[in-house]
């Protein structure tokens, strides 16, 4: 199993550009989520999904959209990138078996100039 | 908002020594988890302790939970250089977790 795969690993965007961060998992997990990690701030939840077709907002959802058309994929869209969105983004997934253990991808380092 | 707050923020020890890290949280929990993050990598789950447990062991890891004080501690015994990483406590369920700002542990060879 590959686990949680994020692409790309690095990206530089100009202010106002749009892009999609990809996240895929091959563990048949129902729960998936996106976090951003900023220096001195820890990880903050952006959006999460409890299953295909179901998404909800986390702590910092503004400027980001998500959709979940399949169990495997959970892309994160930046509609109009801003310098404040410069961060490292992590995707995570977990089982629904009450174990609560989350599996994280390797991260996408995004710079908006 | 951070549910968990770890301390110290940074810890530097000699290889072979024990490392103790603390986490405090604000609201009631069902469980608390500890994760490790190596530089430039994603988080890796270390151990989970449920609210009705007081202590749990996994290899060189020992975690305690005091729900009356809303605090947890992670002890790494006989530390190794490979334990150098950031450590986070997290609360919540499944992939909807709230983390503290993390502790940077440096283990000197």
Image (tube, rainbow, N blue to C red):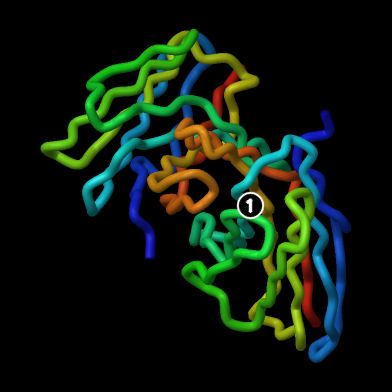
> Image point 56% across, 31% down: which residue?
B45
Report the residue that reaches farthest toward the front. Answer: A53
Image point 88% across, 58% down: which residue? A8
Corner quadrant of residue A51: bottom right
| Location of residue B94 with respect to B45 vertically, above or below | below
Residue A67, x across and y down, in percent = 71, 69
Q: Secondary structure at mark 1?
A: strand
Identify the chain of the residue marked 1, using the numbered disc in the image: A
Q: Choose between B2 and A61: the one closer to the eye.
A: A61
Between B76 and A31, the one lying in front of the other is A31
The picture quadrant where one finds residue A39 is: bottom right
Q: B107 or A17, which lies in front?
A: A17
**As displayed, is residue B91 above or below residue A98?**
below
Task: Locate residue B5, reporting x and y percent.
Answer: 34, 49
Q: Quadrant of residue B7?
A: top left
* Mark 1 crowdedness (10 Å alpha carbons): few <14, some 14-19, many ≥20: many
Q: Say left or right for A90 vs B92.
A: right
Above or below, B95 relative to A99: below
- Identify the image quadrant of the C terminus of chain A: bottom right
In percent of width and height, residue B74 lies at 37, 26
Give the residue at mark 1.
A32
Q: Is residue B78 left or right of residue A53?
A: left
Q: Look at 68% across and 76% down and name the residue there.
A: A65
Q: Position of residue A110 (x, y in %)?
A: 78, 67
Image quadrant where one finds the N terminus of chain A? top right
């Amino acid at each position: 199993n590959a686990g949680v795969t994020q692409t790309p690993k690095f990206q530089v965007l100009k202010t106002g550009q749009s892009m999609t961060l990809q996240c895929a998992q091959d563990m048949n997990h129902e729960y998936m989520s996106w976090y951003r990690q900023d220096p001195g701030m820890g990880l903050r939840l952006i959006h999460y999904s409890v299953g295909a077709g179901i998404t909800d907002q986390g702590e910092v959802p503004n400027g980001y959209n998500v959709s979940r058309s399949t169990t495997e994929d959970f892309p994160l869209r930046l509609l109009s990138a801003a310098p404040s969105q410069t961060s490292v983004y992590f995707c995570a997934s977990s089982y629904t078996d009450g174990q609560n253990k989350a599996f994280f991808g390797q991260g996408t380092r995004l710079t908006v100039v | 908002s951070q549910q968990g707050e770890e301390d110290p923020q940074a810890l530097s020890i000699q290889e072979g020594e024990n490392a103790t890290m603390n986490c405090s949280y604000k609201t009631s929990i069902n469980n608390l988890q500890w994760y490790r993050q190596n530089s430039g990598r994603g988080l890796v789950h270390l151990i989970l302790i449920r609210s009705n447990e007081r202590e749990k062991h996994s290899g060189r890891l020992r975690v305690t939970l005091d729900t009356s004080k809303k605090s947890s501690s992670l002890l790494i015994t006989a530390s190794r250089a490979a334990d150098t990483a950031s450590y986070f406590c997290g609360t919540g369920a499944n992939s909807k977790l709230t983390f503290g700002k993390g502790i940077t542990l440096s283990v000197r060879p």
